[in-house]
Image (spheres, rainbow, N blue to C red):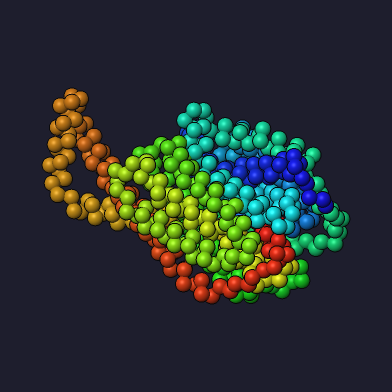
Amino acid sequence: MATPKGFARAIIVLTTVTAAVMELIDTSIVNVALSDMSGSLGVSIEDISWVITSYAIANVIIIPLTGFLAEYFGRKNYYITSMIIFTIASYMCAQSTSLVEIIAWRFVQGVGGGALLSTSQAILFDAFEPQDRPMASGLFGMGLVLGPTLGPTLGGYIIDHASWPLIFMINIPIGIAATLLSFYFIEKKEGEGKKKKDIHIDYNGIILLAAGIGCLQFVLERGESEDWFNSQSIRICSIVAAVGLITFIIYELNIKNPAVNLKVLGNRNLAFTTIFTFVAGFGLFTSVFVYPVLAQRVLGFTAFETGNSLLLPTLAAVIMMPIIGKTMSKGVTPIPFVVLGFTFFAIYSVMSANVSPDVGKGDFFIPLLIRAVGISMCQLPLINQAVAGLQQKDYAAGISLNNMIRQLGGAFGIAMANNYVANRYAYHRSNIVSTMQHGAEQAAAIAQGIAAKTGDAATVATNKALTIMNASVERQSYYLSYLDTFRLIAIFFIAVIPFVAFLRVKKKTAAEQAAALKAVAESH
């Protein structure tokens, strides 16, 4: 297949990066719309949060299977079909009038979106010559960093100026344009679609993976809101996840053509890299979860203000991605980047754990800038390190597993943060209440002031005073809880750095580097 040039290549870059950014935006754009959606559909916040859970479950199931499905159906066909599925599901989400309906369509959207992200990168890499693929990697990395950050900003603006269905409807013109451009400008790979009869489909492995990973993701995402093992659904899903994953591992290790090649984890370098990848996913997703909640619940930022505070610092990572990709293409070892990235993320967490409760919006710029630099130094180097020491034929399997581990690290981090915040909130609230002196006198003074100003009866004024005092205690308790969570994130990043001693560096030839980068694309 000839490498496209000029206008054709520009269109492919625009199409693939836009499609990936669109999918990534949808992972976070609904986070700021949950209140509006719950009110419109007449359900609780806990119930409507299923729109996040269902999308995440679909994504984590499809990621390790994308390479196989693209090979089976043909990459171009699979890409265009996934884009159509994503676009139609976006429309149906916007038209949904019940909780079950929107959850189902969000799952379908996640199936199309997970494939969209992976295949976009493979197509983008094929549009460049091997020596130029580090630049392609950097271009795609820009989208990977920018997408999740744009979600809250765009979602906040839409909620402030329109209604929640628009967060799904904006995908439709983009999806239609990307589908048409893909049909006319993206060429099929050589031999695409001719090997279908020769491909063995590991149905058992796919079913076990879907059951095990899907239930595990459900437990991690919904455990806190369902009160963990006091919930029958959590107990059942935990059993299914354990049995499904154990059976999956045993089965995949003992068949000739597995859906996911787990044997590559026998490589020490990949095994230890997955530890770093898990922690990177843990920190990335948890920080994106904790910071916006702290900003809105405690500091009083609006959703749009919170998104804007994240956007500008993130541009630093967008700029750095192509630079790091180009540097690594010259043979620079990825390990120093990984160590620096984890150190920067730990510094960001420590700085965030020491913010004042009256901090201004601009005061977060430096910590968030440090976080962005840390992210840019972790992303590409960890992917590169995952394949160091693997044979070329195992690149795709190694990177696919590495990406799945990152997603699970993020799910674990958010679940842990939810649980940790709840426990620390109870602890801090108890401490604050127990150490309050003259609480009754303060309540009486506040009530007297309210009565004098509004003319309320003594009982009404007292209830308002108690509400004000309770809100103050609640705000302070949550504030301390989120700071504790940032400290915990810092501990994770610092604790894992010594494991770098177990990583092995193998300098690649230019051909090996190009093959590794291509494998990154085809199995992201």
330 or 458, which is in the foreground?
330
- Give the x, y percent position of residue 28: 53, 44
Count up the numbered dots: 0
What residue is shown at x 63% (from left), y 50% (from top)? 140
- Measured along the vertical axis of the image, is residue 129 above or below residue 389? above
Q: Is residue 396 visible?
A: no
Q: Residue at x 61, y 42 (%)?
A: 22
Place of residue 257 in the rendered image (x, y in percent of width and height, measured from the top left): 76, 68
Which residue occupies 16% across, 45% down? 439
In the image, farthest residue toward the top: 455
Where residue 217 sits in the image (x, y, percent)?
56, 56
Front residue of 282/38: it is 282
Dividing the image into 4 quarters, which one contains the C terminus?
Answer: bottom right
256 shown above or below 308: below
Left or right for 238, reference 422: right
The residue depicted at 71 percent of the width and 42 percent of the height is 10
Q: Which one is in front, 36 or 303?
A: 303
Q: Where in the figure is residue 483, as x and y percent of width and height?
A: 34, 54
Question: For residue 132, which quarter of the picture?
Answer: bottom right
Front residue of 518 and 278 = 518
Q: Residue most toward the front?
A: 330
Task: Kindly indicate the quadrant of the structure image that contains residue 461.
Answer: top left
Residue 257 visible in the displayed image: yes
